[in-house]
Image: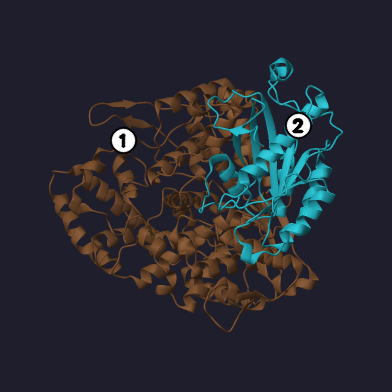
Chain colours: A brown, B cyan
């Protein structure tokens, strides 16, 4: 599988299948970096677009193609799903995750899905499936039996295939995350690209971000150090008043200067309007947590400081890491965003838990943002670059749309600035974002972390933290080192020396996602004038988007990227 | 302002003039809510912080002319000033918004005024809005003081509440009217007192959808304090 083979087959309902494959002329070896990643749906329309774009740009690159065979049974299975099957407790937040597996069944050589060699741990897992289910989730027992009964009958083979695929994926997560002492990050990246089931999400994100090292033995120690370090930092910067009613009003900043006061105030007013549609973010316990994370981050990162929009970004880490604590406090319940988003974490979390959660979210948030820092430094050059790249893509792939924009005097900057600044978080519902970020973190993970077994990146002075700095080999490997040393002597307690490459992979991929997103509305936009276009793109109709929509978007983006990456 | 009339646009190109306006001011003073109130008569409890710029339009009628106001709502945080400044270009009017319960946001109006003046080649019509008038019990900025500031700087002035829908339409309409009157004065097409049918002047304007005050050297003075309402 060194050379990726990707045949996209779209099966129309149950009868005959129309197969179409895209052949391109490219030798850039997709599979080496990202061997088994995508199950994609391509419409006829896209294929036309792609092929015409390829010919028109006349690239000599792209030939080897293709990879995954996809069957789309047009959503029928989902509808026919027996009620008793319900939601599998160990699966993602809603039916979509299941639906995807059912609707897009990968039926071929792709090792990821149909692995000819099942690893030892994996086979152990499969043979102990029932006990695993009972362990992880009590509710699973009954469902599991039902599913196995179905396995034995041939009545609903599609359903069992779906279930088998789910089980296989879960088994793979078990193997990757808990099957060895040294986690293979490459494997985790590959599998995460396709969406991480809720119960593995938190730990997978931490690994993908390099917050947890691949060496499992070190996890406990690292977490302990980081959490202590965060706690110390907070104690030095924010004071809780005696009356501990946990409101933001009850917290005070320590180093009172105009700048810090301004930052504190800005974060405060922004948190009042962060995810106003999700109850979780209205709880003062959550607001207080986010206030502390964001404020502490801002004073430690003086070159960027707090920038409106990063509050949105921070919430993704917070919400995903909350899963761990919710799980602990609700052992008899399945993991479900609905419940998590409605419950005040204070009901199931101790102060210590809050500190741990905040710390993990803080460090991961910091790692993530550090890699896209030039999106947020003064002048926001990273964003300008991405917007311009998006425009170039549009011009090449859909010249008619571009011409229409030019004609209507629509500038890409006018609508795409926010897409870049908030990574489409303002455009897509939160749950979709949380799914999307599985892929984003998988995509950018190799930028953020080094090779397996190698850990890098923070040098934190004055706080007893002992992570290794960027290794010279790593530095050499990265062409563009974005070096930012903050060595203000007046600010001893908050010095971070960071040396890392800018996260080109994430920014690069994100532009393609934005293109795929824009392209969705192309036909509509072409019939609109300036006002219509801007108003439409300011509030794209995505409120009903489910994970399936996100996955199609990501797959499309991936294909666009494969075609246009080096051309 | 009895000559004014507002209604929603039936056709996008169905207007005589296009006026570009910008909304500026500190973060959290209510710029976006003023705009949603004015353009759609809504108050969004669930509004989020503005990232970069956002946009809305409103059709206003003066003298039987249809004016389309294209209003750009900008992010208030200082970090975004470099970005949002780009949107001042071509603006005929600006509204500087502060929060009557936040002294700081009022004090910063002077900075905003300077930013406007240093980023625009031409004089434009500027209004100042003290928003959140409904929060009287938390008032920190006296009306008289703000009026005085507005008068000294030749700004229109209104206190508004986007929440209770008080004076919002008035503040925007006054600005638009001032631009319109200013334009008439400069071009010498019509006197201020002539609100009669302007059919005979149509041709000159209707050749272009966008009206520019490119040659204006004159600041709007005639209605500088007419908007005082408090």
Please tell me if label 2 and label 1 are on a single chain. Answer: no
Distance from Cα at disc 2 to Cα at disc 1:
63 Å
Residue A130 in the image: x percent, y percent? Answer: 22, 63
How many numbered marks does the figure carry? 2
Residue A530 in the image: x percent, y percent? Answer: 60, 29
Left or right: A200 in relation to B116: left
Which of A175/B26 is in front?
B26
Q: Against A335, is A510 above or below?
A: above
Q: Residue furthest bottom?
A: A242
Residue A178 in the image: x percent, y percent? Answer: 39, 65
Q: Chain of mark 2?
A: B
**Could you say which quadrant of the image residue A546 lies in?**
top left
Instruction: Point out which mark residue A293 bears.
Output: none
Which of A530/A557 is in front?
A530
Q: Residue furthest right?
A: B217
What SS does tag 2 mark? helix
Which residue is at a point 64% across and 66% down the rendered structure image?
B138
Q: For mark 2, what is the residue?
A: B181
Which residue is at a point 51% across and 60% down the rendered structure image?
A317
Looking at the rendered image, the disc whose residue lies closer to the viewer, 2 or 1, is: 2
Residue A540 seen in this snapshot: yes
Residue A62 in the image: x percent, y percent? Answer: 53, 29
Question: Badge 1: how crowded within 10 Å, few (<14), some, or many (20+)?
Answer: many
Residue B90 seen in this snapshot: no
Q: For mark 1, what is the residue?
A: A72
Q: Against B184, is A163 above or below?
A: below
Q: Chain of mark 1?
A: A
Q: Quadrant of the N terminus of chain A?
A: top left
């Amino acid at each position: 599988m060194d050379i990726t083979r990707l045949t996209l087959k779209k099966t129309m309902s149950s009868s005959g299948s129309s197969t179409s494959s895209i052949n391109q002329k490219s030798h850039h070896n997709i599979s080496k970096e990202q061997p088994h990643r995508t199950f994609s749906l391509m419409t006829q329309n896209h294929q036309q677009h792609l092929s015409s774009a390829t010919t028109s740009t006349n690239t000599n690159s792209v030939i080897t193609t293709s990879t995954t065979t996809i069957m789309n049974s047009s959503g029928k299975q989902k509808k026919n799903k027996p009620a008793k099957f319900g939601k599998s407790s160990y699966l993602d937040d809603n039916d979509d995750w299941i639906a995807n597996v059912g609707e897009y069944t990968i039926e071929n050589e792709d090792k990821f899905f149909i692995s000819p060699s099942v690893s030892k741990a994996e086979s152990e897992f499969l043979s102990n499936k029932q006990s695993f289910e009972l362990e992880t989730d009590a509710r699973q027992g009954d469902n599991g039996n039902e599913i196995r009964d179905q396995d034995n009958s041939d009545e609903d083979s599609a359903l069992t295939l779906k279930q088998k695929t789910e089980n296989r994926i879960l088994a793979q997560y078990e193997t990757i995350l808990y099957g060895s002492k040294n986690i293979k990050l490459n494997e985790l990246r590959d599998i995460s690209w396709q969406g991480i089931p809720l119960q593995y999400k938190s730990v997978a994100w931490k690994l993908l971000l390099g917050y947890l090292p691949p060496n499992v033995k070190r996890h406990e120690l690292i977490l302990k150090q980081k959490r202590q370090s965060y706690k110390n930092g907070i104690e030095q910067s924010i004071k809780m008043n005696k009356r501990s009613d946990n409101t933001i009003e009850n917290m005070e900043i320590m180093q009172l200067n105009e700048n810090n006061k301004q930052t504190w105030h800005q974060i405060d007013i922004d948190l009042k309007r962060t995810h106003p549609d999700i109850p979780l973010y209205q709880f003062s316990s959550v607001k207080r947590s986010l206030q502390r994370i964001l404020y502490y981050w801002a004073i430690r990162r003086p070159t960027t400081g707090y920038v409106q929009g990063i509050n949105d970004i921070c919430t993704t880490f917070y919400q995903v890491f909350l899963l761990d604590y919710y799980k602990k406090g609700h052992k008899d319940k399945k993991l479900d965003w609905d419940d998590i988003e409605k419950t005040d974490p204070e009901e199931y979390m101790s102060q210590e838990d809050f500190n741990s959660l905040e710390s993990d979210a803080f460090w991961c948030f910091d790692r993530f943002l550090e890699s896209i820092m030039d999106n947020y430094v003064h002048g926001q050059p990273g964003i300008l670059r991405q917007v311009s790249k998006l425009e170039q893509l549009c011009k090449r792939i859909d010249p008619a749309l571009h011409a229409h924009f030019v004609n209507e005097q629509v500038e890409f900057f006018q609508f795409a600035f926010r897409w870049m600044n908030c990574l489409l978080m303002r455009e897509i519902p939160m749950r979709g974002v949380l799914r999307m970020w599985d892929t984003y973190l998988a995509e950018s993970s190799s930028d953020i972390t080094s090779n397996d077994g190698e850990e890098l990146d923070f040098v934190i002075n004055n706080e007893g933290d002992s992570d290794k700095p960027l290794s010279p080999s790593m530095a050499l490997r990265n062409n563009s080192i974005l070096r930012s040393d903050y060595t203000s002597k007046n600010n001893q307690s908050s010095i971070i020396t960071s040396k890392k490459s800018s996260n080109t992979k994430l920014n690069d991929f994100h532009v393609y996602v934005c293109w795929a997103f824009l392209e969705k509305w192309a036909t509509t936009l072409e019939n609109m004038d300036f006002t219509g276009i801007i108003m439409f793109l300011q509030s794209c109709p995505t409120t009903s988007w489910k994970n399936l929509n996100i996955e199609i978007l990501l797959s499309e983006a991936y294909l666009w990227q494969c075609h246009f990456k080096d051309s | 302002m009895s000559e004014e009339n507002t209604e929603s646009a039936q056709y996008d190109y169905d207007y005589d003039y296009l006026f570009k306006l910008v909304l500026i001011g500190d973060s959290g003073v209510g710029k976006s809510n003023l705009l949603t109130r004015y353009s759609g008569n809504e108050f969004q409890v669930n509004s989020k912080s503005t990232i970069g710029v956002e946009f809305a339009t409103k059709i206003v009628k003066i003298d039987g002319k249809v004016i389309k106001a294209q209003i750009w709502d900008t992010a208030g945080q200082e970090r975004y000033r470099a970005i949002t400044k780009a949107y001042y270009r071509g603006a005929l009017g600006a509204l500087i918004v502060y929060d009557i319960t936040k002294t700081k946001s009022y004090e910063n109006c002077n900075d905003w005024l300077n930013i406007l003046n240093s980023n625009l080649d031409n004089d434009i019509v500027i209004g100042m809005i003290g928003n959140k008038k409904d929060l009287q019990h938390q008032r920190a900025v006296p009306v008289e003081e703000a009026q005085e500031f507005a008068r000294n700087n030749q700004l229109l002035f209104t206190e508004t509440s986007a929440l209770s829908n008080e004076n919002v339409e008035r503040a925007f309409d006054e600005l638009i009217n001032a631009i319109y009157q200013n334009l008439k004065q400069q071009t010498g097409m019509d006197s201020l007192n002539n609100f009669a049918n302007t059919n005979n002047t149509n041709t000159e304007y209707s050749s272009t959808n966008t009206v520019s005050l490119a040659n204006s050297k004159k600041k709007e003075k005639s209605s500088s304090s007419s908007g005082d309402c408090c």
